[in-house]
Amino acid sequence: MANPIEPFKDLGLDSRLLSALEHQGLHTPTEIQDQAIPVILNGQDLIASSKTGSGKTLAFLLPSLHKLMKTKALSKRDPRALILAPTRELAKQVYEQLRSLTSGTSFNIALLLGGENFNDQIKLLRRQPHIIVATPGRLANHLSERSLMLNGLELLIMDEADRMLDLGFVNELNQINDAADHRRRQTLMFSATLDHAQVNDMADKLLRAPKRIAVGAANA
Ligand code: ADP
Ligand code: MG
């Protein structure tokens, strides 16, 4: 096996994130976190897989928040980061983790779920959230209605990409990809498996020279 995993504090993350982790009693990254965090901090696109329960949420939230803390926004109006999850329940779980990591920071975050009141979401969007967590269908609706623009997007993150594609969100993902300038953003795809043709097709389209990480896979 590789070197032993170093504690979170050796990954170079912002002290506010380290305090939040400490507060939650988390000291040591999981394997996917240990491998993915440096790649994301380094600015590379990434496609990564590891099994359910291995800590993929923090693997993308921690370095993403660090980068947003350390860099100036491309746009004052548009969101800086968009995190897509396949279902309302999964999006809520990501949002809750994001909320606990950003409490005590000035980040304005929003959750946009299908099935909820559209006009209430438009009001939320008028407050110009820095980070949005959403299900793909509803996010695509907001793009179509022009209640949201993604020109200033710095980070596009797809969680459970395999499931999003299994649920048939190909057109929505393409629409979102087209709305957010490739040249300015970093794109991350997380999946339970990389052995999925549609995931690889989507990665070819959405990611630029991505690093591939597969924790626990036979060919990793
Ligand atoms: P996945 O998305 O890979 O299925 P999650 O991100 O939902 O996994 O994390 C699963 C559980 O593991 C969560 O309860 C989370 O709080 C916990 N967890 C995440 N990272 C760590 C860590 N470094 N140390 C201990 N527990 C962790
Ligand atoms: Mg997950």
Image (tube, grey):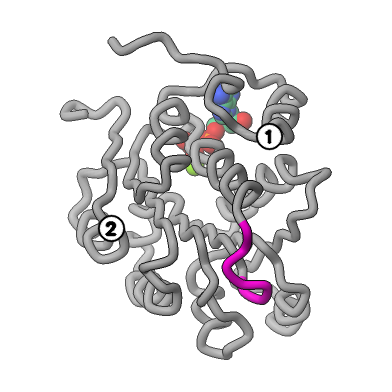
Q: Element at badge 2?
A: loop
Locate residue 211 relative to residue 176 in the image: left or right: left
x, y (%) of residue 25? 71, 20
* Quadrant of the frame with the N terminus: top left
Residue position marked by numbered label 2 in the rendering: 208
59 w.r.t. 105: above or below: above
In the current view of this chain or complex, which residue is farthest to the bottom?
A: 145
Q: Element at badge 1?
A: helix
Residue at position x 70%, y 63% in the image: 110
The numbered disc on residue 35 is: none
Binning the other alpha carbons within 10 Å of mark 1 as few (below 14), some (14 to 19) or many (20 upward) gives many
x, y (%) of residue 70? 62, 47
Locate residue 37 relative to residue 61 in the image: left or right: left
29 w.r.t. 139: above or below: above
For the question of whether residue 33 can be seen, the reply is yes
108 w.r.t. 99: above or below: below
| Mark sitting earlier along the chain (1/2) | 1
- Majority secondary structure of the magenta segment? loop
* Quadrant of the frame with the C terminus: top left
Residue at position x 54%, y 40% in the image: 63
Q: Amino acid at mark 1?
A: Leu
x, y (%) of residue 170? 33, 71
Locate residue 36 relative to residue 2 in the image: left or right: right
Which image quarter has ligand 1? top right
* Residues in magenta, as a range: 72-78
Residue position marked by numbered label 1 in the rendering: 17
Mark 1 and mark 2: Cα distance apart in space: 28 Å
Magenta run includes residue 202: no
For the question of whether residue 86 can be seen, the reply is no
